[in-house]
């Protein structure tokens, strides 16, 4: 593209439209005749921190600058450049790539997505191409963009590097085993020319010579077997550990990603990537890669031996090879796209299972079994259709390669017989040649069939690295601040937060003293839970700062910071295991006495003792077998066991009845003393004892004060409280369904 001039359809932009300070700095950057074509304001850096920047497209190059506009990076325009646009979990990115690598990547929040689309359109116009919309299927799947899948296989070296010595030994054994397997066909030449043909001509058999040749054949076969077994054992051992390390690294990386990433992913898709994809890669490394290396070595060695025997016959034999190579290249590209699509659709099947099995109670309650079966059948049918297309291509490819190899053998026979008739070669040479060429084409056929497994593994590796390449939206600090003793002083200073384009928290400030209990109240969607998530640093603020004991929480190591927070969620989640293990989840080293004390404090001890095995009773997946109130009390005990200086209760008593709520509330009244406590409660009466109530509406704080003070103000809190009180009175005055049924005739009159 360099040197091209824009056509008449290219629209130029006035540099005066740029924001400062880039507008002033750009005048010193543009060369004579260089014109501005498009620009995009950035608000994220490479670590997904909120930093302003600017990307500029001119008629000659790309320019990018940071917030101070002091330094510009430049990429001259070239014909092989491409621009790739994608968005995921509220973060958009533009990648500038060429045929060899990714040159750079710019990131932004989706509030700038429209401007990003305009920049891409300007780029395509500058390239004399009509702007192409990104297909919905591609836009929704991040694994369709980025590096080619085959390159992901080479990136597996990251996991293979610790085992490089054993890999080198395995490759050396492969070379020796392959060389040993090349000896038997070579010994057929002297057996034919020096033993069998002379015997047919009336000469006696030289038994000593025969025994030497047969001993050589046996020794070569045994050596090839021994080396092959040793090689297979070593490489299988290495491949299993590469697969295990990759699964562990992927799961560990998933644990470090922010909640925002999981909000944009399906559980079934992640399970499929971590499970079936890693298994497929492990199978490829242990079997197919080994076969591929062996095939390549066999083909190279066979070609060298054939050339040493008879170059002319060798060239005739290799005539079909270019066409087979072209077919492998063509089929490989088509298989890659087919396997990538098959992987995505298989994830849809896993997603249906991940949705339906945990939610089986809801499915049965609403009698939606047939609907879920239809969902599964539809996903399964799409998977079947994709696999049918792949199999149709593969079923044609395999027999075609076999046919070409048979034609190659036919050429050898025809040309070889002609050479024997001309006394150019002996029968022994032709026999050895046929043995070698048979192995050659067998290995070529085998190598062509490995294309399918290679593309499957490449697609799987790409989907694994899509996870590993994703940076957390809650990054770890580069210079972490130690967090040993926590007082619990929390300061929120002019914080703001956005979900994509939607602003949830706006310019909110709040100072929470150590040991103070704060009650958060407000309508649904007012931002209460989002505020708690920001304090827990499940997300990072878009603007402003949150400080703990005077230090920005982004300077603390994330795990150390969260370890000082006890959290009880609105929807309690229990893991499969015993009751004691669930209570001790935050402190696995807790003693039995400490676990029981936490359960007593959460008013859970009595019902736990009534379980079949007490604290050793197994809790089903997600707490199946326990009531909502029982699950919530175990969740409260789990939070209390870690004895946190900061306690966050997000609708902690919403899943229990009134009697149980009163019992839990008594325990909480004692436990919140000395702790900084932030409580969200649907029933406002439970927050009467809070030191301050913070009333939120549409991401703003509208009132702060104690219960009695806020009622006296006749403001937002008073309206909420009276509306809830009125609702309770109406509910209490309504007759039960039994009384309504029994007195139905009276009511009718």
Image (cartoon, rainbow, N blue to C red):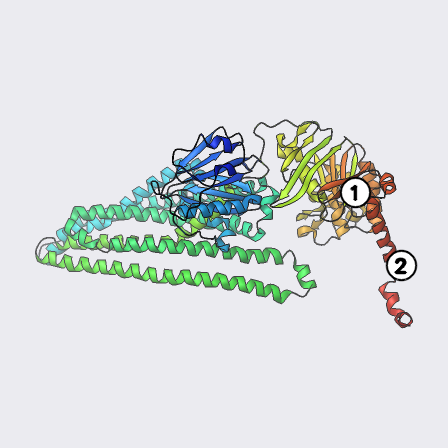
Q: Which residue is mark 1?
A: 602
x and y percentages locating residue 149 in the rendered image: 42, 48
Which one is in front, 669 or 596?
A: 669
Q: What residue lies at 60% left-to-right and 48% top-to-bottom?
A: 263
Tag of residue 295: none
Q: Position of residue 592 (x, y in %)?
A: 73, 39
Q: Which mark is first along the chain, 1 or 2?
A: 1
Q: In this rendering, is residue 661 above or below 737? A: above
The mark closer to the camera, 2 or 1, is: 2
Residue for point 87% across, 61% down:
734
Q: Is the N terminus in the top left, top right, bottom left or bottom right quadrant?
A: top left
Whole-angstrom CA distance, mark 2 to mark 1, is: 32 Å
Q: Is residue 219 in view from this perspective?
A: no
- On the rendered image, what quadrant is the C terminus found in? bottom right
Residue in the picture at 16% in, 48% down? 309
| Residue placed most toward the observer, 138 or 561 | 138
Assign a secondary structure to mark 1.
loop
Is 174 in front, or is 465? 465
Residue 733 marker: 2
């Amino acid at each position: 593209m360099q040197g091209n001039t824009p056509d008449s359809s290219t629209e130029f932009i006035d540099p005066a439209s740029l924001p400062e300070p880039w507008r002033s700095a750009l005048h010193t950057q543009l060369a004579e005749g260089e014109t501005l074509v498009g620009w995009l304001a950035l608000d994220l850096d490479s670590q997904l921190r909120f930093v302003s920047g600017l990307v500029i497209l001119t008629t000659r190059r790309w320019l990018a600058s940071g917030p101070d506009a002091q330094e510009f990076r430049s990429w001259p325009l070239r014909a092989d450049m491409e621009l790739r646009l994608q968005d995921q979990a509220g973060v958009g990115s533009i990648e500038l790539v060429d045929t060899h690598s990714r040159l750079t990547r710019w990131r932004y929040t989706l509030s700038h997505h429209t401007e990003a689309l305009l920049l891409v359109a300007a780029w395509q116009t500058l390239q004399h191409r009509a702007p192409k919309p990104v297909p919905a299927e591609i836009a929704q799947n991040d694994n369709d963009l980025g590096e080619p899948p085959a390159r992901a296989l080479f990136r597996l070296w990251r996991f293979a590097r610790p085992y490089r010595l054993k890999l080198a030994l395995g490759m050396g054994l492969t070379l020796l085993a392959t060389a040993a397997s090349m000896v038997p066909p070579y010994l057929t030449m002297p057996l034919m020319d020096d033993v069998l043909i002379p015997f047919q001509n009336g000469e006696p058999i030289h038994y000593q010579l025969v025994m030497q040749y047969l001993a050589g054949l046996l020794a070569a076969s045994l050596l090839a077997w021994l080396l092959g077994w040793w090689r297979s054992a070593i490489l299988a051992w290495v491949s299993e550990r590469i697969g295990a390390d990759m699964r562990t690294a992927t799961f560990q990386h998933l644990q470090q990603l922010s909640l925002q990433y999981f909000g944009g992913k399906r559980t079934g898709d992640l399970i499929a990537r971590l499970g079936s994809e890693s298994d497929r890669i492990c199978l490829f490394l242990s079997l197919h890669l080994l076969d591929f290396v062996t095939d390549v070595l066999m083909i190279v060695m066979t070609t060298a031996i054939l050339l040493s025997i008879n170059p002319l016959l060798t060239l005739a034999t290799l005539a079909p090879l270019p066409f087979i190579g072209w077919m492998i290249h063509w089929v490989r590209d088509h298989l890659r796209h087919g396997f990538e699509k098959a992987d995505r659709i298989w994830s849809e099947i896993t997603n249906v299972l991940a949705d339906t099995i945990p939610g089986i109670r809801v499915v049965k309650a609403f009698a939606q079994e047939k609907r879920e079966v239809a969902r599964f059948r539809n996903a399964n049918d799409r998977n079947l259709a994709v696999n049918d297309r792949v199999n149709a291509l593969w079923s044609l490819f395999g027999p075609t390669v076999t046919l070409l190899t048979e034609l190659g053998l036919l050429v050898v026979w025809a040309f070889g017989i002609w050479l024997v008739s001309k006394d150019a070669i002996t029968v022994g040479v032709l026999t050895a040649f046929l043995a070698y060429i048979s192995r050659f084409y067998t290995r070529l056929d085998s190598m062509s069939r490995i294309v399918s497994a290679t593309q499957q593994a490449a697609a799987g590796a790409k989907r694994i690295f899509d996870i590993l390449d994703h940076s957390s939206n809650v990054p770890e600090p580069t210079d972490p601040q130690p967090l040993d003793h926590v007082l619990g002083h929390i300061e929120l200073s002019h914080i703001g937060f956005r979900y994509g384009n939607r602003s949830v928290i706006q310019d909110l400030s709040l100072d929470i003293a150590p040991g103070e209990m704060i009650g958060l109240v407000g309508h649904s969607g007012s931002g209460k839970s989002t505020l708690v998530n920001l304090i827990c640093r499940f997300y990072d603020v878009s603007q402003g700062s949150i400080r703990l004991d005077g230090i920005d929480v982004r300077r603390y190591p994330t795990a150390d910071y969260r370890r000082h927070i006890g959290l009880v969620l609105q929807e309690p989640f229990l893991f499969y295991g015993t009751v004691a293990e669930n209570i001790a989840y935050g402190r696995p080293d807790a003693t039995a006495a400490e676990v029981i004390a936490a359960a007593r404090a959460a008013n859970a001890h009595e019902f736990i003792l009534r379980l079949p095995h007490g604290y050793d009773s197994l809790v089903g997946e997600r707490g199946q077998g326990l009531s909502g109130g029982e699950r919530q009390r175990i969740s409260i005990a789990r939070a209390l066991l870690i004895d946190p200086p900061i306690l966050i209760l997000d609708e902690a008593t919403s899943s229990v009845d009134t009697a149980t709520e009163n019992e839990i509330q008594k325990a909480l009244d004692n436990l919140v003393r000395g702790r900084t406590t932030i409580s969200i409660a649907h029933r406002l009466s439970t927050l009467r004892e809070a030191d301050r109530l913070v009333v939120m509406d549409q991401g703003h704080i509208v009132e702060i004060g104690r219960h009695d003070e806020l009622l006296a103000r006749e403001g937002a809190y008073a309206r909420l409280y009276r509306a809830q009180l009125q609702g309770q009175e109406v509910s209490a005055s309504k007759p039960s369904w039994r009384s309504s049924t029994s007195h139905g005739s009276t009511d009718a009159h």
